[in-house]
Image (cartoon, rainbow, N blue to C red):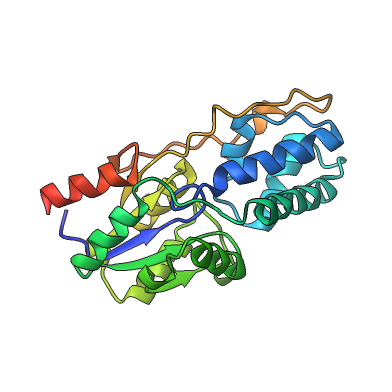
Amino acid sequence: MKKPKVFILDMDGLMFETGRLAYRAYLTSAKLYDYQMTHDVYYDLTGRTHPEILVKMKQLYGVDQPIDDWRQEMIQAKEALLQQEKRVYAKSGLFTLLEYARSEQIKVIVASSNLNSQIMRYLEMEHVTSYIDAVVSGEEVKQGKPDPEIFLTALAKSGESKEHALVFEDSIVGIQAATNAGIASVLIPDDITDLPQYQGQHLVDETQFTKATASATFVFDTLAQATDYLRQIM
């Protein structure tokens, strides 16, 4: 692999602990509607744009269910948690990676399915804005992951070639998108399996889970581990 000139970072679950925040909000709202909520459901929804999440939820729970209302309750529950905690908590090793990128003059692009307003809000909350060269939000693309559009858009903003880019992701669907874009990738899984699940009366149709398979170029437990490895090989 050639020395990277741009790091393309997913945000939720990769840079910040917003994956855990989102799961807690899903869990709270699921109990209101008595829907089963499991870790597998969360992992199947993560990385998607809002419209795609609604489509997937209807596949998992049934088109006759009030999915739009549940999703809105989830968004409100997440906002309540944000208002309460006033933090999204930088992931372990995030600033190690960002400082390394700065020292090596590597550009940093955030490519997230989230809204631009939320991306900027989270970056400002954790004082990360000064490290970021550009942002691509879910509003700027027509297709969500695993379509490569968001990463190709980020690459275009960077002005660099695929050979000099490296994508950092926490989800398999994100790694699929990087693979489809022809860009090397780093997978750092966002482990939420210590959080509780909820059985509920309305069960998930497990046959509708996305069969996502992809192989990242590198896999690490933390961003700090990824940074240490990059220092060694570059």
Q: Residue at x 50, y 51 (%)?
A: 89
Q: Quadrant of residue 9?
A: bottom left
Q: Is residue 183 visible?
A: no
Give percent across and percent down for residue 108: 34, 66
Which quadrant of the structure image shows residue 210?
A: top right
The residue at 33%/46% (across/down) is 223
In percent of the image, x 44 and y 49: which residue is there? 14
* In the image: residue 233, left or right of residue 148: left
Q: In this orientation, which residue lies closer to the viewer: 194 or 107?
A: 194
Quarter of the image containing the C terminus? bottom left
Q: Give the camera-side residue of 14 and 210.
A: 14
Image quadrant where residue 159 sits: bottom left
Residue at 71% of width from left, 41% of height from top?
A: 26
Count of all numbered marks drawn on residues in the image: 0
Q: Is residue 201 visible?
A: yes
State the image coordinates of residue 87 (x, y, percent, origin top left).
57, 54
The percent coordinates of residue 40 (x first, y second) are 59, 31
In depth, the one of 129 and 136 nearer the eye is 129
Q: Viewed as shown, does residue 119 lie left or right of 201?
A: left
Could you tell whether 84 is left or right of 104 in the image? right
> Outermost residue, left direction?
233
Location of residue 106 in the rendering, given as x and y in whole percent from the top left corner? 24, 67
Does residue 225 appear to the left or right of 60 in the view shown?
left
